[in-house]
Amino acid sequence: MCRDLYSQYPYPKGRILTRLRAPKCSSTTAEMVQESLPWHTLITRLEQGFSEETNYHVPVRHHHTMVDPVGQLADSTLLLMPAWKIGAHVGLKAVNVFPSNCEKQLPAINGSYLLMSGTTGQALAVIDGNELTARRTATASVLAAKYLASARP
């Protein structure tokens, strides 16, 4: 869980292991993402991220098919997308694709983004991944259009 924790755990031979305080981890809704990431700021920051030497590490996305052995549900997919900048932040976007959710009147795609400290690894925030992805995709499209349009004679 993401919250301040002070607890003591029994340890072999009567010793006590004290758990240190973790930073507060906030949960961010889609509405909070919209308020926190105005379009003009997002476009500027993403353009900087694309154009600068940022030292971000972005491995290839992990793709896992989850097969229902009984066959009651359609096969589902788990996508894991890590990225980090040493000494700054670590992020992990996790997306679940459950095609059978449509039958339950639920979204087939659900995502969350976990932001962690790049110096301690502790969770800092859980962010609505659907809204974050929608805004990032739209912003990248704006930047692509900008550069493609300026490349034309």
Image: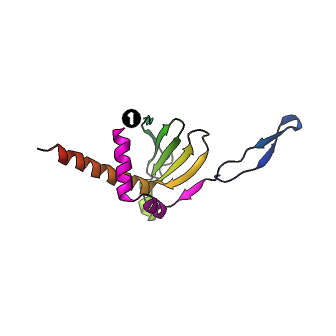
Amino acid type at mark 1: Glu
Image coords of residue 147 (percent x, y): 23, 45
Residue extending farthest left: 153
Question: Position of 13 compared to 88: left or right?
Answer: right
Residue 44 magenta: yes
Mark 1 neighbour class, 10 Å CA radius: few under 14, some 14 to 19, many 20 or more: few
Residue visible at 39% across and 59% down in the picture = 38
Image coords of residue 56 (percent x, y): 44, 36
- Magenta range is 25-52
User: Which one is in front, 29 or 150?
Assistant: 150
Question: Position of 91 compared to 10: left or right?
Answer: left
Residue underneath mark 1? 53
Which SS class for mark 1?
loop
User: Which one is in front, 114 or 87?
Assistant: 87
Residue visible at 26% across and 47% down in the picture = 144
| Relative vertical location of residue 84 with respect to residue 100 in this rendering, above or below | above
Colour setup of the view: rainbow
Residue 47 magenta: yes
How many numbered marks are there? 1
| Relative vertical location of residue 120 with respect to residue 70 in this rendering, above or below | above
